[in-house]
Image (cartoon, rainbow, N blue to C red):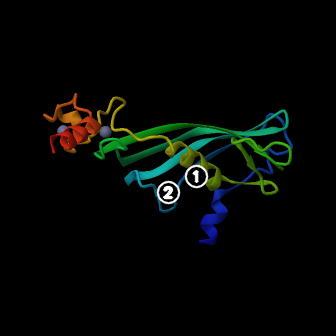
Amino acid sequence: MQLQEDQMKLDLREIIEIPGASLPFRCTLDTARLDFPSVVRYNAAPEAEGLVQNTAGILSLTGTLRADMICVCDRCAREYACRKELPLRVTLAANLQDDDGEDVFPLEGNFLDLDDVLETCFILDMEAKHLCREDCKGLCDKCGANLNDGPCGCKATTDPRLAVLEQLLDK
Ligand SMILES: [Zn+2]
Ligand SMILES: [Zn+2]
């Protein structure tokens, strides 16, 4: 495992002191560390590629993270194919004393823990709701039918609280 860990540390010695210099990277994420309740499985391990650039002494990472997976819809619980193309744009800092913004990642000396940056970007993105489609109609809260398949036949106009009241009044 030691070898694997070394590979994921990006050596920035070539660019860290040279404004204008850049270093490309390509990295495959370990799906064993990307376990989310909304992901049924990954069709392939998520991959990222991009560039670390030194712009006037400030290091930034830009690129794209691609994922291909089967997710569960948060609203109707149906499984669906989900492809993501997540743009990456983060700032790298040698120390975080006066800048601890969300998109700033620390350096360990001249090295960047690329795995950590990419996993964090992916995890932040996964906190959003996952819907099988933008206008997913969800499930009927009475009979549980998937309303994307059409109306279920329940009376849509009856407020469940009113229904309880009616039952009480009948007795
Ligand atoms: Zn849905
Ligand atoms: Zn229903």
Q: Residues within 10 Å of mark 1 (few under 14, many from 20)?
A: some
Nearer the observer, 85 or 101:
101
Q: Residues within 10 Å of mark 2 (few under 14, many from 20)?
A: some
Residue found 22% across the figure and 28% down from its top: 157
Can you give x and y, in whole percent of width and height, for residue 34 in the image?
Answer: 50, 57
Residue corresponding to mark 2: 34
Residue corresponding to mark 1: 119
Q: Amino acid at mark 2?
A: Leu
Question: Who comes first in sequence, dot 1 or dot 2?
Answer: 2
Can see residue 42? no
Q: Are marks 1 and 2 in contact (CB under 8 Å)?
A: yes
Per the image, label 2 sits on a secondary structure element best described as loop
Can see residue 16? yes
The answer to which quarter of the image holds residue 132 is top left
Per the image, label 1 sits on a secondary structure element best described as helix
30 vs 70, left or right, is right
Point out the residue furthest to the bottom here. Answer: 1
Instruction: Point out the image quarter for the C terminus.
Output: top left
Residue found 60% across the figure and 65% down from its top: 4
Nearer the observer, 46 or 162:
162
Q: Quadrant of ligand 2?
A: top left
Residue found 22% across the figure and 31% down from its top: 158
Q: Amino acid at mark 1?
A: Glu
Can you give x and y, in whole percent of width and height, for residue 1 in the image?
Answer: 59, 71
As drawn, the label of residue 51 is: none
